[in-house]
Image (tube, helix red, strand yellow):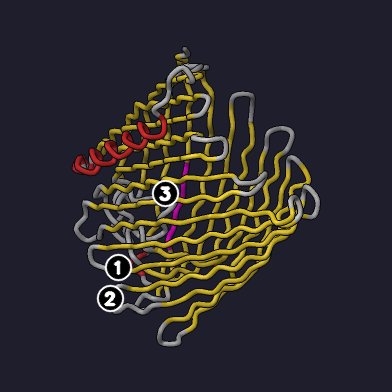
């Protein structure tokens, strides 16, 4: 783990010095914001097993720091949170977690901008909002995503961006394979008729490598044509084409996916968007998989501070970069959340979500239904103290019984932080 941290830090520092070095007299402000959190988490299924569940209490101590620098042409923000996790019943799982986020940018000319970001995570917690596959046990793992881009605006609304993304996942567990990908790409936005017709083109190439599974190359292309009907309504048609080519003897395939959609945001406190389409996947042997793609999403904010968000989506993904490599992944999902202020210093939230994942490339075919719901309270006890109480329920119901699990998780977190960040200004 230290080896990867060293190289990630060295890489990030090099990029920061490259694009953010002229923080001379142009620096407007530097802010420094320290804080510390103490928490305790209870889980009734420590290893996410179908049977013989074990419970535990996990105490965490997290001193964190946020640093930001803003200049006339440059900006940088860095967040780092080390967390010591101490287990009451199973102390062999004690871990020092790391969570770091870096974002930096520089306007190198009037129309050209360079950006770099890096996200690093080292943890033993198997639950991830991104990974919908099943991770057993509490063996630590680390993942990192670094992205670099250069964008140029060649018209009032016209732009082109060249980007590159690198990802790796390394696991302490010997039964979970390591993996990485490299992804260069280009995105272009062009308005042939300003304020009326727009086009967006995206092309990317991904080289994915695995310790055990077959490596593959993926070419992705997307074209969207948009028509604006006034300042509050836009309608678009989109086509996506994807080609997956295995380096060895895997079943290569192509995906064709047309759709149409619209975005409506006439009111400042309400918006609504929807898209509808279909995908067709055909492999080298002539087998065809198909299904709907699309999204329905709305967000509404009341004057009293209450907000409601609801979304439903269907489509396809690739479950290759989590704890399991399950290949092509059609899915259906719905989520909803409500934030409601209970008082001047007390806020509440409740959320629920469901996702049905289908893995047609598995033998035998596999599908998982993931349920997730919870609620929380946030109390501003003092100007420099925040108390949070959260409850989360998660259930995975698979057609393969060994993958099933149910977890109830409750936590309380107390955070101490200054009222204002420390400002260092020249």
Gap in angstroms between the C-alphas marked 1 and 2: 7 Å
Locate residue 93: give its quadrant: top left
For the residue pair 324 and 396, the one nearer the viewer reads as 324
Gap in angstroms between the C-alphas marked 3 and 1: 37 Å
Extreme residue in the bottom direction? 286
Which residues are the magenta region? 391-396
Mark whose residue sits in front, 3 or 2: 2
Q: Give SS at disc 1.
A: loop
Residue highlighted by disc 1: 215
Locate residue 43: give its quadrant: top left
Q: Check if residue 248 falls in the magenta segment.
A: no
Q: Give SS at disc 2.
A: loop
Residue highlighted by disc 3: 408
Q: Position of residue 106 (x, y in %)?
A: 47, 34
Whether residue 416 is situated above or below residue 50 in the rendered picture: above
Q: Give SS at disc 3.
A: strand
> Do the residues under discs 1 and 2 have CB atoms within 8 angstroms?
yes
Q: Which residue is located at x 67 percent, y 62 percent?
A: 225
């Amino acid at each position: 783990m230290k080896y990867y941290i060293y190289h990630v830090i060295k890489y990030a520092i090099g990029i920061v010095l490259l694009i953010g070095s002229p923080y001379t007299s142009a620096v407007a402000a530097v802010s420094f914001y320290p804080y510390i959190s103490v928490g305790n988490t209870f889980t009734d299924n420590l290893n996410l097993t179908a049977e013989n569940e074990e419970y535990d209490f996990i105490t965490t101590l997290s001193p964190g720091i946020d640093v930001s620098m803003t200049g006339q042409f440059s900006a940088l923000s860095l967040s780092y949170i080390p967390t010591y996790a101490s287990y009451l019943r199973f102390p062999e799982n004690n871990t020092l977690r790391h969570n770091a986020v870096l974002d930096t940018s520089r306007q190198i000319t009037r129309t050209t901008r360079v950006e770099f970001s890096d996200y690093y995570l080292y943890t033993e917690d198997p639950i991830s909002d991104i990974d919908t596959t099943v991770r057993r046990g509490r063996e630590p793992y680390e993942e990192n995503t670094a992205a670099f881009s250069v964008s140029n605006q060649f018209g009032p609304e016209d732009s082109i961006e060249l980007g590159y993304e690198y990802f790796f996942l390394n696991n302490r567990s010997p039964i979970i394979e390591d993996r990485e990908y490299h992804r260069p790409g280009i995105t272009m936005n062009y308005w042939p008729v300003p304020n009326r017709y727009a086009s967006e083109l995206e092309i990317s190439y991904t080289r994915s490598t695995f310790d055990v599974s077959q490596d593959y190359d993926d070419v992705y292309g997307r074209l969207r044509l948009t028509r604006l009907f006034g300042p509050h309504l836009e309608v678009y048609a989109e086509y996506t084409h994807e080609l997956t080519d295995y380096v060895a003897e895997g079943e290569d395939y192509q995906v064709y996916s047309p759709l149409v959609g619209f975005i409506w945001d006439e009111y400042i406190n309400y918006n609504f968007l929807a898209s509808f389409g279909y995908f067709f996947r055909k492999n080298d042997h002539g087998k065809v998989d198909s299904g709907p793609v699309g999204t329905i999403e709305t967000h509404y904010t009341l004057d009293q501070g209450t907000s409601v968000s609801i979304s439903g989506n269907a489509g396809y993904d690739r479950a290759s970069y989590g704890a399991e490599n399950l290949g092509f992944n059609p899915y259906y999902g719905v989520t909803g959340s409500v934030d409601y202020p209970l008082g001047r210093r007390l806020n509440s939230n409740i959320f629920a979500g469901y996702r049905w994942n289908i893995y047609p490339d598995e033998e035998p075919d596999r599908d998982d239904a993931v349920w997730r719901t919870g609620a929380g309270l946030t109390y501003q006890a003092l100007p420099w103290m925040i108390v949070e109480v959260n409850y989360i329920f998660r259930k995975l119901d698979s057609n393969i019984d060994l993958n099933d699990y149910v977890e109830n998780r409750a936590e309380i977190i107390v955070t101490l932080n200054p009222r204002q960040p420390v400002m260092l200004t020249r």
